[in-house]
Amino acid sequence: MATSVTSPDRVAELPTQSAARRGSAFLYRHAKVRLALLLSAPLFWLGFVYIAALVALLITAFWSVDSFTGDIVIDWSFNNVATILTQSVYQAVTLRTLGIALVVTAIDILLALPIAFVMAKVASRSAQRALVIAILMPLWASYLVKAYAWRNVLAEGGILDWTLGFVGLNSPGYGLEGTVLTLAYLWLPFVILPIYTAMERVPDSLIDASSDLGARTWTSFRTVILPLIAPGIIAGSIFSFSLTLGDYIAVKIVGGATQTLGSLVYTNVGTANNLPLAAAIAFIPIAIIFIYLAAVRRTGALNNL
Amino acid sequence: MRINRLSKTLLWAVSAVVLSFIYVPILVVVANSFSTSSTLTWPPPGFTTEWWTRALTNEGALAAISTSIIVALASTAIALLLGTVLSFALQRFEFFGKSTVNLLVVLPIALPGIVTGIALNNAFKTIMGVQLGWATIIVAHATFCVVTVFNNVFARLKRVGTSLDEASSDLGAGIWTTFRLVTFPQIRSALFAGGLLSFALSFDEIIVTTFTAGSGVQTLPIFILDNMFRPNQAPIVAVIAVVMILIAIVPIYIAQRLTTSDQR
């Protein structure tokens, strides 16, 4: 870096270099200008592309569609909001979606607890590492491929049908049960990981103390570990809950005729061509998620995400 | 900790069931891609590589793959630029509204994909009057890819600190020289890892894509979704699904190796 030790009067002799040099010196002295330059492009992008789009979505929910031409008309009204609040279809779909989200979350927590416990407290170091990788890998396999995999599993004459055939049962096929199973499958790694992280932080000495005092494995788990990992469980449930509320692809692939909030939004954007109504529906899951987040905020689970 | 043998066996058994719950469906897809049956019958009646040859010469599939690669490259390039400057701003400076900016970066990935999708669809079509196509997919993908680059570079900047940069400027280097010779080499592998993750994220994305792609442009996930419901296309979709798993997992694996080897 020979140039970096040039004296100021030498810089003056080299005008081509001095421009960059002066810019550099100016920026070095003015931290605020540096910050402004760094922030301008990303803030422009996220602010004007994303935030503006979200605000516009909120506004569009108060517009309507000309039933004759199919064009969006700017006439301010609460019609869409009134529609989704009063018509029984929307109430039924909202309740069904909430129900699916709750069952999926419950299944995931029940499946995640034992394996997270094994990973954190039972397995040897090398088995632990292998298990973490085994849980992480499918997280990165495409969402669409995983939903498609369940289309394979649930198919008539497919592997589930074949397996359950040995005990005289059939695959539930494409429908509500299939949707619940598939969604539980899709979000399982998201639920296992925060629970595992929380479980790892529980000191072994506490569990040892509990068993020294005579508690059985199950009692130790229930009275010592469970309260300590509650924030991890809640963090995991936020994933499975909010991801389920917004999903429509899995429902489309394995849901048969099942309708959820997500699929209602999708049909209203596409075939029904009623974007204002779709916008109004889209705010139902957002509202539910915000209520849920506000409810769990005091548990400190949000710091575990 | 001490656990009696029965509980231990039970716990391991449950874990094995959960692991098979995770892996069996993916293995079923792999098996079906070699099945002689064109419905999703189990067990596969016979073995064939016909679907693989047909899928790998299918023009629609090949076009969709190249579309996906172009979209992923373009949005990753934008995400690299925006994510890097953002991580410098948030890691090296203190300013008013910092936590809001932080939230802004995470928001596109924290909100359900359908909200991001419909918001962008509405902004492009209704508000701006733009035709959906290449540009709109790339803009949408770049928006949610910023966070992966940001996370990687931010963590790296936090770890390497500023002492080397300060030493460089104490020795008289200007900020460009310092960036080129000192800062950049330190964050290069984080940029690479973030870029790979962003590529994989964009390559796989389906929800936001269906709302921003319009009818003219078909990415690989959209191709799969379109063909999934066509009778007798099932095995070809299975082949492409297997290919997608491979294409997504390789970059992730490399990115993981890069970040973990750095931490040691």
Image: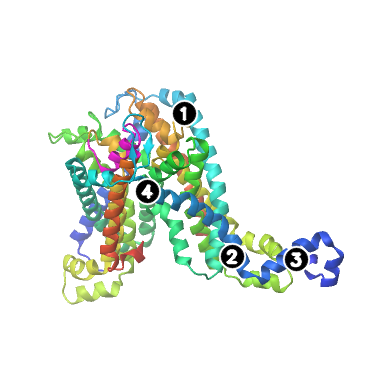
In the rendered view of the protein, which quadrant contains the N terminus of chain A? bottom right
**Residue at 45% over, 23% down:** B54
Q: Which mark is residue A59?
A: 4
Q: CA distance from mark 3 to mark 1?
A: 53 Å
Give the chain of mark 1: B
Q: Is residue B154 visible?
A: yes
* Amino acid identity at mark 4: Ile
Q: CA distance from mark 3 to mark 4?
A: 47 Å
Q: Secondary structure at mark 3?
A: helix
Q: CA distance from mark 2 to mark 1?
A: 45 Å
Residue neighbourhood size for the residue with mark 3, other residues' Cα within 10 Å, grouped as few (<14), some (14–19), many (≥20): few
Q: For residue A268: magenta?
A: yes
Answer whether labels 4 and 2 touch (C-beta < 8 Å): no
Answer whether labels 3 and 4 touch (C-beta < 8 Å): no
* Amino acid identity at mark 2: Leu
Q: Position of residue A33 (x, y in %)?
A: 62, 66
* Amino acid identity at mark 3: Arg
Q: Which residues are magenta?
A: A258-275
Q: Position of residue B58 (x, y in %)?
A: 47, 24
Q: Is residue A128 above or below residue B62?
A: below
Q: Position of residue A28 (x, y in %)?
A: 67, 69
Q: Earlier in the sequence, mark 4 or mark 2?
A: 2
Q: Quick check: A107 left or right of B201?
A: left
Camera-near label (1 vs 4) is: 4
Q: Secondary structure at mark 4?
A: helix
Residue neighbourhood size for the residue with mark 1, other residues' Cα within 10 Å, grouped as few (<14), some (14–19), many (≥20): many
Residue that mark 3 sits on: A22
